[in-house]
Image: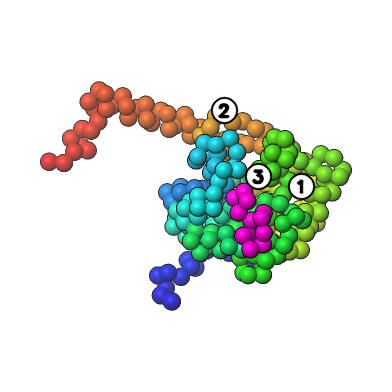
Amino acid sequence: MSSSVSQSPKKITAEMLRKRKAANGSPKIVATTAYDYTFARLVDDLVDIILVGDSLGMVIQGNPDTLTVKIEDMVYHSRAVAQGAQQAHVVADMPFMSFQPSVEEALKNAGKLIAEGRADSVKLEGGVTILPMVEKLVAFGIPVLGHVGLTPQSVRGFGGYKIQGRTDSAKEAILQDALALDDAGVFGIVLEGIPSGLAKEITERVSCPTIGIGAGPDCDGQVLVSQDLLGMNPEFKPRFVKAFVDMSGLVREAVSNYGKEVKEGKFPSSEHSFQ
Ligand code: KIV
C-alpha cells in the first residue's frame, strides 16, 4: 500500500483513547462535534475526538430531533470530516434504526461508516439491549464508543429530553448498561443527561474512559456539540451548555458589515479587483 493512502502517523486511535482513564493521571479527553471538512480541519489539533454526531439532524438539517437521520447522511458527513482530521479520532454516530433491527444491520451499517465514511470508530446509543450488536462489531475489529443515559434516539420513550437516572431503579439500570458495555470491549462510554453522582460512580467502576455531556465534572472527558460551545444558537441555553464565544454575534456583525460595504460601494474596492 502506498504511504499516501495510509493512516496519518499522528492519528489518535481507539486503543490510545481506551488507555486515557483520567484516574490514571491522563489528561481528560476533549471532544466536540463536526459535520464538515473546514471545521474538522480547524479543530483537528485542539481535540482528541471529533464526533460526527447524529445531532446533525437538528443543527444541520433543522429537525426537532435526531430520528430522521439516515445512514447515508452519516456517511456523507463522516467522509467530509475525515478528510479534515489528520490527528483527531473521528467517531461516526450510528443513526436511529441503523443498528437496532438486527446484528446484521448493525454490522452492515457500521461497515459503511468505516469503509465509505472513513470514520475511525462508531457510536451506538443503548446498553444491555444492544450488547449483541456491540459484541459483533468489536469482534469484527470495529471500535465502538458506547452512549447511555439520556440517549436522544429514545426521546419518544422518555417523553422528552429529561434527565435520566433519578430513581434507584433507573440509576441501577444505567449502571448495568455501562458495566455491560465496558465488558463488551467499548473504548469509551458517553454519559449523557444523568446526575453527577451516578456519572461519578460509573466512572469509578468501568475500566474504559467516560465522556460526559450533562453528567457533571467527574467523567474522564467531555463532549459538547460545536454549535453550542460556539454560541451559534443563543436561544438554546440548557444548564449543561456553556458558550465559550458569542459566534452568533460575530457572524451577524461580519455579515452585516459585508452587506453595508456592498450597498455603499466600498466592497469590492480596487484592492479586491483584477486589472
Ligand atoms: O449526536 C451527538 O452530537 C451526540 C452528542 C451529543 C454526544 O451524540
Question: Residue at left 60%, top 38%?
Answer: 65
Q: Is residue 230 above or below residue 182?
A: above
92 left or right of 147? left
Identified by mark 3, the residue type is Gln
Question: Residue at left 31%, top 24%?
Answer: 260
Q: Position of residue 3 (x, y in %)?
A: 42, 73
Instruction: Label 2: state its secondary structure.
Output: loop
Q: CA distance from mark 2 to mark 3?
A: 23 Å
Q: Is mark 1 within 8 Å of ligand 1?
A: no
Identified by mark 1, the residue type is Ala
Residue wearing tag 1: 199
**Principal SS element in the magenta part?**
loop
Q: Given the current orientation, which residue lies at the most extreme bottom position?
A: 1
Residue wearing tag 2: 235
User: Which coloring applies here?
Assistant: rainbow
Q: Position of residue 20 (x, y in %)?
A: 67, 60
Residue wearing tag 3: 153
Where are the magenta residues, as a range?
95-106
